[in-house]
């Protein structure tokens, strides 16, 4: 059963959509301002979020922007009027789709099904094999190589490379890496990330004369394949 979060300050709409979604078999929670919506999304980790743009506390645009720094949950925006600039900004901030109020519930349900399906397909693909130049990795078998040469990685090194590669061309913070690769809220020294980055660079960049793991100053690291 998919979990859907609706963030909407108009109680009537929130209640109506909640009832309809529950009727369809979704598990639903709602928030009535941007700040609590953002927090609930991070805590509850829904499969999809319906986000009104005009919200008290934090605007929908701002919720979207902050959320995208740490989540790829599909977001369907609701706009009160047919305001093109709001829609464009929302989509720029990483929303997946939008609906203009008033909308037919059937259409919202259809958009939800599409967004959930697309997200599942994207996720499946992101766990699949990857390649750039001669470098390749196959998560299913925990193997990696450069051309015909195998690269021997520990599980942690593999997971780290996999995570960075999943976010190709995007800077990833050390905290992100600790949470997602090491799998816990790390409160101590983040040096462990740097140590493992060094191992990866020795095994991949230095060994094959390519550049894949870039240091992004004051942020963290980024995967981008470059032939030297
Ligand atoms: Ca509103």
Image (cartoon, rainbow, N blue to C red):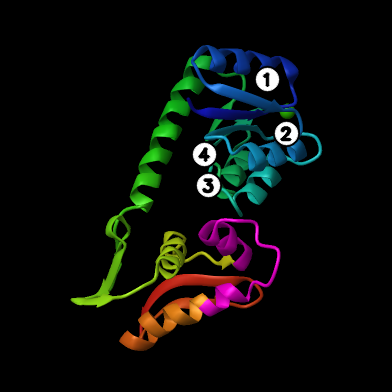
Instruction: Give the label on residue 84, or none.
Output: none
Q: Is residue 190 magenta?
A: yes
> Which structural element holds mark 1?
helix
Instruction: Give the label on residue 74, or none.
Output: 4
Mark 3 touching mark 2, by CB under 8 A?
Answer: no
Instruction: Give the label on residue 72, or none.
Output: 3
Q: Is mark 2 within 8 Å of ligand 1?
A: yes
If the image is split into quadrants, where does the C terminus sit? bottom left
> Which structural element holds mark 3?
loop
> Which structural element holds mark 2?
loop
The residue positioned 60% from the left and 43% from the top of the image is 90
- Numbered-mark total: 4
The mark that comes first in sequence, 4 or 1, is 1
Of 82 and 119, nearer the camera is 119
4 or 2: mark nearer the eye: 4
Q: What is the distance, in whole Å, between disc 4 and disc 1 at their CAs?
A: 18 Å
How many residues crowd around disc 2 within 10 Å: few (fewer than 14), some, or many (20 or more)? Answer: some
């Amino acid at each position: 059963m998919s979990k859907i979060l609706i963030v909407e300050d108009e109680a009537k709409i929130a209640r109506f959509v909640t009832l309809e979604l529950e009727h369809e078999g979704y598990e639903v929670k709602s928030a009535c301002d941007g700040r609590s919506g953002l927090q609930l999304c991070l805590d509850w980790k829904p499969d999809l979020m319906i986000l009104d743009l005009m919200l008290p506390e934090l605007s929908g645009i701002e919720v979207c922007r902050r959320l995208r720094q740490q989540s790829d949950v599909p977001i369907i925006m609701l706009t009160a009027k047919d305001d093109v600039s709001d829609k464009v900004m929302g989509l720029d901030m990483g929303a997946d789709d939008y609906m203009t109020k008033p909308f037919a519930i059937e259409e919202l349900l259809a958009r939800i099904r599409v967004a959930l399906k697309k997200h599942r397909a994207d996720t499946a693909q992101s766990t699949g094999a990857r390649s750039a130049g001669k470098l390749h990795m196959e998560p299913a078998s925990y193997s990696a190589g450069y051309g015909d040469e195998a690269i021997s990685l520990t599980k942690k090194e593999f997971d780290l490379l996999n995570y960075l590669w999943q976010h190709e061309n995007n800077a990833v913070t050390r905290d992100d890496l600790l949470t997602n690769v090491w799998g816990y809220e790390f409160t101590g020294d983040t040096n462990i990330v740097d140590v493992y980055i060094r191992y990866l660079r020795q095994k991949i960049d230095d060994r094959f004369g390519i550049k894949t793991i870039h240091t992004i100053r004051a942020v963290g690291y980024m995967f981008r394949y470059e032939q030297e």
